[in-house]
Image: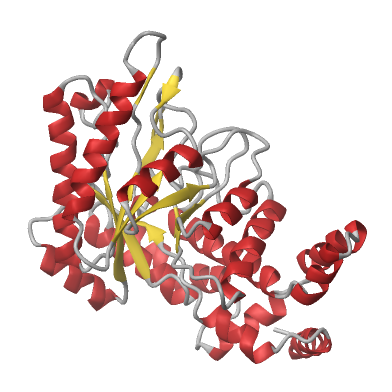
Amino acid sequence: MSNLAYDLLAENLETQGIQVETLKSHLKTQHIETPSWGYGNSGTRFGVFEQPGAARNAAERLEDAAAVHRFTGIAPTVALHIPWDKTDDWSALKQYAADVGIGIGAINPNVFQDQAYKLGSVCNPDADVRRLAIDHILECVDIMEKTGSDLLSLWFADGTNFPGQSNFRKRKQWMQEALAEVYDALPDATRMLIEYKFFEPAFYHTDLPDWGTAYLMATKLGEKAQVLIDLGHHPQGTNIEFIVAYLIDEGKLGGFHFNCRKYADDDLTVGTINPQELFLIYTELVAAELDPDTETDIAYMIDQSHNLKPKVEASIQSVCNLQKAYTKALIVDREALAAAQDTADLVEAESILQRAYETDVNPLLEQVRLETGRDPNPLAAYRQSGYYEKISAARVGGESQGWA
């Protein structure tokens, strides 16, 4: 790392009125949660692509998540997916997570994979199937208590494929009833995050297709229910930063699933296709974070299944890309931007954002990593560590994950 590069960047930031030590304190407390399902063999609707060293069980997924945290320093928790990560001894799994240096984050029920859910889960026309789905989600609430998780993350594949297939209003009522029952079972100081997706696997209609329907459900339920935004779950051209701002202003943005997509779905490395969009989203998130009059409690999580890239490497890439976007959003000259907005100086307002986006913040990130006892280049350090060779030799055979 070039100390000169860091010194020059720090000097430049200070001249803009940005306190570098304060900036570094924000970066050192950034928290990105990685998903357990990002470490096991996974695939598309066409097939599963196996990789050497892929995690075969919950313990190995925790080990990989802990490795990502060791090299990045800002990924201290891992989200679990039930039943893929199910165990007979939750206390032991929680302790093992602590032993390897990781905490358990959001609990994610699976109400889309069982054969019973062919026509939906909580919106299924069969009351017995709706009951099956609700009971599974309630089981996940119980798992939250056993693992110390404070987040229940809900995504539903429910929808229809053909006109006339089902009654929209009845399905809305079934969704409300299911969510209300689960909401009432939530322990104190926990939250329910409601995710949406505008299509797939249902292609005629989806029961929670956009942020408006998710917001409606969360508002009906109460303060412990909020909306979860997934970057890949929007039509092309959607202004996601606008949605972020609105939900923050309403106190209903509870979480973020970071990923990336070119056309549909959401399994590319975050920041791969449109890093400027990621920066603009973070600009809104940071504006709220820095506003003393705005209360936020946003869970920042990655939702990716790495089917082609080596899984731990891809996770490290994702975390570092989020770190970079966050840093660039932190160095936006907020006072100058507000002044340009107030005077309708369109050119200057855009230029202020562009200057921050184009700034090379790598020297600052390298310095922060050194100060927290980590290598300035997490990916290179991981590749040199021998971890991949170790797990590739050790993880042969055994059960694979979820849909594999």
- For residue 87, side relative to residue 201 (left or right): left
Q: Is residue 73 above or below residue 348?
A: below
Residue 27, image quadrant: bottom right
Tell me the quadrant of the picture where the C terminus can be found: top left
Residue 85 visible:
no
Q: Residue 261 location in percent, x, y?
A: 58, 41
- For residue 77, side relative to residue 133 (left or right): right
Residue 273 visible:
yes
Q: Residue 194 location in percent, x, y?
A: 37, 47
Q: Is residue 182 above or below residue 168?
A: below
Q: Is residue 28 above or below residue 318?
A: below
Q: Nearer the viewer, residue 216 or 109?
A: 216
**What residue is at 81 percent from the left and 90 percent from the top?**
11
Furthest residue to the top? 164
Tell me the quadrant of the picture where the N terminus can be found: bottom right
Q: How many marks?
A: 0
Q: Nearer the viewer, residue 252 or 56?
A: 252
Q: Residue 38 location in percent, x, y?
A: 39, 52
Query: How is the protein colored in the picture?
Result: secondary structure
Q: Residue 74 location in percent, x, y?
A: 47, 74
**What residue is at 27 percent from the left and 27 percent from the top?**
123
**What residue is at 55 percent from the left and 51 percent from the top?**
269
**What residue is at 39 percent from the left and 70 percent from the top?**
67
Residue 36, image quadrant: bottom left
- For residue 379, side relative to residue 222 (left or right): right
Furthest residue to the left? 88
